[in-house]
Image (cartoon, rainbow, N blue to C red):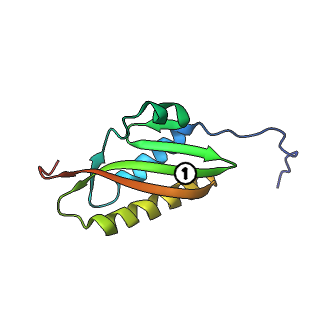
Amino acid sequence: MEEYPETRGKTTIDPGVLINIAKLAALSVDGVSRMSPGPHSIESIFTSSYGGGVNINVENNTVDVDLYLVMKNTSDLYKTSENVQNKVARAITEMVGMEIGRVNVHIEDIDYHGD
């Protein structure tokens, strides 16, 4: 087996990657209809990375996630939210190896039209 010299350098992960992981994980949960546009305050735009229904804040290699969701009208909101939290936390931890602080689910609307 060939040996490689010790790696010198670092790996950086763009916040957009974390946003995409969180978004795809959330949308894969049964009961989630779609992402909501999310917070409408100017402060949220400047405090962390935001992307279409997902707000990511990274501090000391710990990721906090806020998800703004529209749920299907047939879903159990509490159970679906728990499933989203677990799936998003697991996806980020497994894919990028970062610690999860919080995964906050904000239910912004209910989809009664069955999109």
**Residue for point 64% across, 55% down:** 97
Residue 27 % position (x, y): 34, 51
Give the farthest residue toward the left.
113
Residue 19 lies, with reference to residue 96, above or below; the image says above
Instruction: Say which quarter of the image contains residue 41.
Output: top left
Residue 98 lies, with reference to residue 44, above or below; the image says below
To which residue does mark 1 refer? 64
Residue 63 % position (x, y): 58, 51
Residue 80 % position (x, y): 32, 64
**Residue for point 35% across, 55% down:** 28
Q: Which quadrant of the figure contains the N terminus?
A: bottom right
Residue 41 lies, with reference to residue 80, above or below; the image says above
Instruction: Say which quarter of the image contains residue 81.
Output: bottom left
Residue closest to the eye, 42 or 52:
42
Identify the element where label 1 is drawn: strand
**Residue for point 59% across, 36% down:** 14
Please, what is the three-letter code of the amino acid marked with disc 1? Answer: Asp
Count up the numbered dots.
Answer: 1
**Residue for point 51% across, 59% down:** 89
Residue closest to the eye, 63 or 23:
63
Instruction: Say which quarter of the image contains residue 47.
Output: top right
* Badge 1: residue crowd in 10 Å (few <14, some 14–19, many ≥20): some
Q: Is residue 70 rendered to the left or right of residue 21?
A: left
Residue closest to the eye, 109 or 88:
109
Q: Is residue 100 rendered to the left or right of residue 113?
A: right
Residue 54 % position (x, y): 43, 43
Q: Is residue 13 rendered to the left or right of residue 33?
A: right
Residue closest to the eye, 38 or 6:
38
